[in-house]
Image (cartoon, coloured by chain):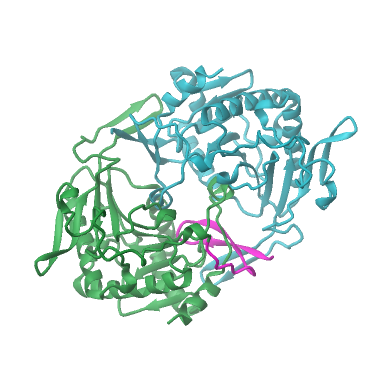
Chain colours: A cyan, B green
Amino acid sequence: MSSEFRKDLLSDKWVIILNDDNNFIPDKDSKFDYKSLPVLDANCPFCPGNENKTKFSIYELKKGNNWQVRVIPNNKPYLKVETNLKRHTKDIFAYIDGTGANEVIIETPIHNIDFDEMEVKDISFILQAYKERFLDLKKDERMEHIIIIKSRGIKAGSFIPHLHSQLVAFPVIPPMIDEELNEAENYYKIKNNCVYCDMIKSEIKLDERVILSNEHFICILPYASRVSFEMMILPREHKSHFYDINEKEVMSLASILKEAIYKLNKATGYSAYNMILHTSPIKLSKLEYYHWHIEILPKLKNFSGFEQATGLFINPTTPEEAANYLKELK
Amino acid sequence: MSSEFRKDLLSDKWVIILNDDNNFIPDKDSKFDYKSLPVLDANCPFCPGNENKTKFSIYELKKGNNWQVRVIPNNKPYLKVETNLKRHTKDIFAYIDGTGANEVIIETPIHNIDFDEMEVKDISFILQAYKERFLDLKKDERMEHIIIIKSRGIKAGSFIPHLHSQLVAFPVIPPMIDEELNEAENYYKIKNNCVYCDMIKSEIKLDERVILSNEHFICILPYASRVSFEMMILPREHKSHFYDINEKEVMSLASILKEAIYKLNKATGYSAYNMILHTSPIKLSKLEYYHWHIEILPKLKNFSGFEQATGLFINPTTPEEAANYLKELK
């Protein structure tokens, strides 16, 4: 078995890529069999007819008389929006009270569906809802950052199969985003360019890991992918904040997301995955050095103690091999 | 449920600590029932009598005529020591061939034992073996860093119950260590002190999270613990490199490790855990700002997609509550 250390430009972290294994086979318990479920589940808190099981709607997008997308408060919030933001110290240690917003975005009234089988228009409704929640929550003086994360399947951390995302607004910048911002700023200081823009140019030129593209977006498998079939979707035009997305771009993004999830689900045999929106902290004005993007992280294997302890991921699949496979999938 | 964001001084990362849950109950599949196994297992590659199942000994420590600690090459190495170290670039991307050393330290001839039931003297043999391997491998010009990691139980990534650790020598500095070095250097620039030394002082003064101490070492539950019962063992005296440990300190460390693992196993009902040695990169001379230490990370719960995606851990137990519980355990 040969292997290489690849440097991730965006996080400045090394990843070990195994060159000649190309093991695409997910663990059995990664399988996420939502397609065999009914269209409507009377016990699902997110299904139409059960709206009374959730507190209230923070936001709704309607299609005719019925809701198509609903945003509700998370019923088990880690962070409470009612808490005042107070900063404390105790000797050399610092803490902040657990202020924040925990919301759930119910992305469709249909119980057993994912992006791959949805209308592009319906996916665009979801993205529109994301944007509206950003614009509303950014008015809250206490909040620094908003994460939107979708978890599909138990392995990815979700026990409810009905398509939904979690939105969390924080009074701090989460570690992953903080790292990306730092590295992007360092790169900008040296090269006077956005590292994401440079990466997009390089990926298009090399044409080894680009699996999808349209007028406004590109979908690549990152050079230093941490897991098999890891995907990244980026706007071609430099934009630091997701909430600056326009109507045309929303449609383009909906379209590339549908295709990306189609390929992912086919390739992994419908396995668990996470999808995470990475964007600039809401308080910061437009940044020259940071570029919003979406990461899709399949959960095909358990992480070993080694990976958690060292931060060094071992990826059994080269992204070039995985990209070839995905490109050929129709 | 109330919660707080705590800043980890050592990594500059925020952790969410839930204040009033204090949920100590591990997931069922975290249980690691090695005690019901036989003392000797004819099928275990690490048991005495099966030495021919492993390639050869890199290093052995004997007790009478028999080995007490054996170091062998990993039979499925991700990195090969025979590979030349070559640095490559491809457009804006960089990689290094997968050079490195993968060794396994078999820490006892007994199949069904952990530190808690071992003689302090026998644990000191293991630490001596760690040190000897560091001193030998640091001669290799290509290597930058050595990690020693112990994985106990399937949840922690190990399928062999016989007590062992993995040693990996890398041509790069693993991300976790790189982060710690950067943060420690930043702190040193501002405060002109080692952040670990300052933290030890503060922990002793506050006396809320110190669970064990002896002449040379202290065992704390970190202020911003990522998981329930996370532990950190640090030398009281500032030392950047583990391999500078002396004979007396080896005995002290063996003694505190025995007690720490005893408390951990009792508290978690013998659950899976990882133990990781964090030390300075081998090529660097003595550092004023970095302090070697051991981290013990219990694997009681699955990480959610949220934690993996944001880098923000949610710990259901305050370390103060966990420390009180552990202190009272006899």
Q: Position of residue B269 (x, y in %)?
A: 46, 69
Magenta stretch containing residue B11, yes or no?
A: yes
Res B236 seen here: no
Residue drawn where x is 31% and y is 72% of the image: B237
- What segment is highlighted magenta in the picture? B1-26
Q: Which of B287 and B130 is in front in this view?
A: B130
Q: Position of residue A317 (x, y in %)?
A: 41, 31
Q: Where is residue A229 in the image (x, y as percent from the top left)?
A: 49, 31
Residue drawn where x is 53% and y is 47% of the image: B308
Up-down relation of residue A257 to residue B308 (above or below):
above
Residue drawn where x is 46% and y is 18% of the image: A207
Up-down relation of residue B75 to residue A86 (above or below):
above
Assign the N terminus of chain A to one quadrant of the image. Answer: top left
Magenta stretch containing residue B96, yes or no?
A: no
Residue drawn where x is 42% and y is 64% of the image: B195
Q: Position of residue B267 (x, y in %)?
A: 47, 72
Q: Please indicate whether residue A90 sits to the left or right of residue A164 in the image.
A: left
Q: Please count the marks in the image.
A: 0
